[in-house]
Amino acid sequence: MIDGRAIAAVIREDVAARARALKERGVVPKCIAIVSDGDAPGLLYAQTARHGGAQVGVEIEIVPIGAGADTSGALAILARVVEEPSAHGVIIQRPLPERIDETRVVEAMDRRKDVDCCHPQTFGLLALGRPLFAPATAVAVMELLKRPPAPALRGARVTVIGRSPIVGRPVSMLLIAADATVTVCHSKTADLADECRRADVLVVAIGKPNFVTADMVKPGAVVVDVGTNVVNGRLVGDVDASVRDVAGAVTPVPGGVGPVTTAVLLRNIVDAAERQTN
Ligand code: NAP
């Protein structure tokens, strides 16, 4: 098992030290998270980040998009929030409800404050290999793969299942930048199990409980399970427990990608605060 909580603790220590240094200059690193009404997972993510941030000197404010707000309402909220001088970062919890045109909203993001990498230009820089910010979950996967028991990524065969803009796509770009040989799979992939079995490292971000089973994993491979699914009131990943008998190492759910994601988000906010203060 790869211990995500231990890796998160190391990142949080660095964040806390840098937040203290900013505070000595009169700056409290702050992010505003915009969460639409009824988005329970988005609200939980923002609340978890707010709780974690409070422990390391990073402030997170949650601003709701009300049930009645349409695209212009959401744009008005974002315009107000990005103008807030005390906020160094702004996050839009996605997906937004269908009544809101998400493309228009993310295109109105201020790139300096785009700590979750939602604006097409921020994402474009990531795709070109010179990221300003990268989505916290994608960076969390890289943090988990940075140290043993993960193999060196240079030249390694890595398969990513999932191509969402929040996880699969950005993690693939970070892996390419780390000189891995990357295969990206999705719901239309033929012979998914074959693609997985070729991988030295398998990153799974599908959102289907226990989807990846032992027969899909190369013996000794490292498996990163991004999935968070609630089954009978319990949090489970996309990777079945049987994989532990075959893999060299697996990230647990909970206690793997999740805590590292929160720590990386806080680090992205401190990065933004430092850039804007300098
Ligand atoms: P998403 O937007 O629903 O994307 C899911 C991806 O999986 C899509 O690319 C989809 O393919 C692919 N997929 C679905 N069924 C498949 C199948 N049978 N075979 C192969 N590929 C399949 O989800 P997401 O936002 O990327 O999130 C993925 C999971 O990660 C969820 O469980 C989410 O809760 C979790 N998550 C965790 C964290 C964390 O911090 N721990 C953060 C974000 C997300 P198509 O593109 O072809 O539809």
Image (cartoon, helix red, strand yellow):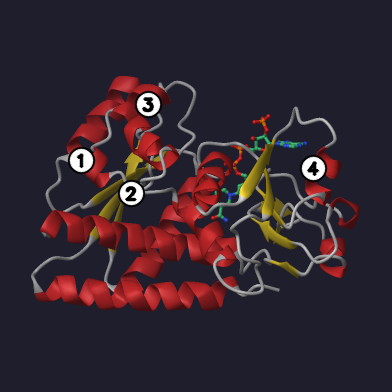
Q: Classify mark 1: helix, strand or loop.
A: helix
Residues at badges 2 and 1 in contact (C-beta under 8 Å)? no
Callout in the foreground (1, 4): 4
Tell me the CA gap for discs 4 and 3: 45 Å
Callout in the foreground (3, 1): 1
Residues at badges 3 and 2 in contact (C-beta under 8 Å)? no
Residue at 54% x, 46% y: name it.
176
Tell me the CA gap for discs 4 and 2: 32 Å
Check disc 3 and give the amino acid type. Answer: Gly
Check disc 4 and give the amino acid type. Answer: Glu
Please report whichever mark, 4 or 3, sits nearer to the chain's N-terminal start: 3
Check disc 2 and give the amino acid type. Answer: Val
**How many other residues sit within 10 Å of disc 2, few (<14), some (14-19) or many (≥20)?**
many
Q: Quadrant of the C terminus?
A: bottom left
Which residue does the numbered mark 3 point to in the structure image?
68
Q: Measuring from the top left, give residue 206's x and y in whole percent.
A: 68, 43
Quadrant of the image occupied by residue 248: bottom right
Check disc 1 and give the amino acid type. Answer: Val
Which residue does the numbered mark 4 point to in the structure image?
195
Residues at badges 4 and 3 in contact (C-beta under 8 Å)? no
Which residue does the numbered mark 1 point to in the structure image?
82
Q: Classify mark 2: helix, strand or loop.
A: loop
Ligand 1 within 8 angstroms of badge 2 C-beta: no
Q: Measuring from the top left, give residue 167's x and y in whole percent.
A: 55, 45
Task: Report the residue that reaches farthest toward the front.
Answer: 155
Tell me the CA gap for discs 1 and 4: 42 Å
Residue 93 seen in the figure: no
Residue 64 seen in the figure: yes
Residue 115 disc label: 2
Please report whichever mark, 2 or 1, sits nearer to the chain's N-terminal start: 1
